[in-house]
Amino acid sequence: MTDEIRKLKEWIDGSSNIVFFGGAGVSTESNIPDFRSVDGLYNQQYDYPPETILSHTFFMRNPEEFYRFYKDKMLILDAKPNAAHYKLAEWERQGKLQAVVTQNIDGLHQAAGSKAVYELHGSVHRNYCMKCGKFFGPEYIKEAEGVPRCDACGGMIKPDVVLYEEGLDNDIIGGAVSAISRADVLIIGGTSLVVYPAAGLIDYYRGHKLVLVNKSSTPRDRAADLVINGKIGEVFSSLG
């Protein structure tokens, strides 16, 4: 056990008010591609750049192409939680972790057993008819031919994910800010902290135990109280 891991374990053992803020790196260990990594979606060939496809304008103008990309690259329903997800759920059950704030849309935190999860960018598991509001699960979207249509009114269905040009949900932002501002220990894992406004939420942390766990360096490393370079699942597994 390294000195950094030992210090993290000490902080966790002594806290009952931990908040975890996570990004794509938490899900890549469950074989969900990271948009911005070397092997991620941004480096794969497609008809349009992912930023364009995953925009509100593109969704409205070209839903066929949006859903072709979305079903192929985003709707990964066979992914399973990894060690990081399970460790966070365990801390919550123990009364140590108060909230997970995530930029991911895969629902793996809930699949692992976490209850207090703020999904900043929505979830692939929620889909709604834009005409009548009927709810549909992800399997309905995955199995639909072309653009998914409501079986009640024929309206187009939209995933409850935040696309480019769309704002974040105010209630979710409020809950995340409240949890972060009250936290004793804030652990940030698997994110490069370059996506705003989500990355700006950590500015609300007022404590002195800011932990960054990431495979590579981030713009916030110098402001952290503890930096651990490594895979989040491996780091959490080593805590015992």
Image: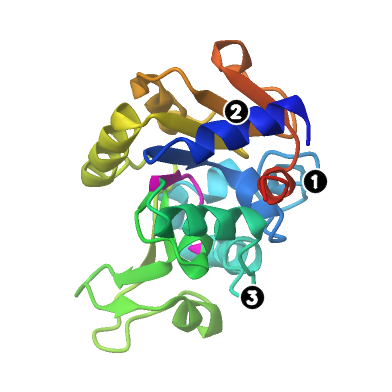
> Where residue 55 sits: x, y (%)?
46, 46
Amino acid type of the residue that numbered disc 3 sits on in the rendered structure = Asp
| Residue drawn at (61%, 32%) of the image | 8
Q: Quadrant of the N terminus?
A: top right
Q: CA distance from mark 1 to mark 3?
A: 20 Å
Under mark 1, the amino acid is: Asp
Q: CA distance from mark 2 to mark 3?
A: 29 Å
Q: Mark 3 or mark 2, which is nearer the start of the sequence?
A: 3
Query: Image quarter for residue 196?
Result: top left
| Residue segment shown in magenta | 97-107
Pointer 1 residue: 39
Q: Which residue is mark 3?
A: 78
- Separation of marks 2 and 1 at Cα, in angstroms: 22 Å
**Residue for badge 2:** 212
Q: Along the line of sight, which residue is nearer the eye, 239 or 180? A: 239
Query: Counting residues from the N terminus, which is met first, the one under dot 1 or under dot 3?
Result: 1
Q: Choose mark 2 or mark 1, whichever is in front.
A: 2
Q: Residues within 10 Å of mark 1 (few under 14, many from 20)?
A: few
Task: Decide which of 36, 96 is in the foreground and name it.
Answer: 96
* Nearer-the-camera pick, 88 or 52: 88
Tell whether label 3 touches label 2 (CB within 8 Å): no
Where residue 60 sits: x, y (%)?
Answer: 39, 56
Q: Which color scheme is applied? A: rainbow
Q: Closer to the camera: disc 1 or disc 3?
A: 3
Q: Is residue 200 above or below residue 13?
A: above
The answer to which of 54 and 202 lies nearer the viewer is: 202
Looking at the picture, does residue 169 appear above or below residue 27?
Answer: above
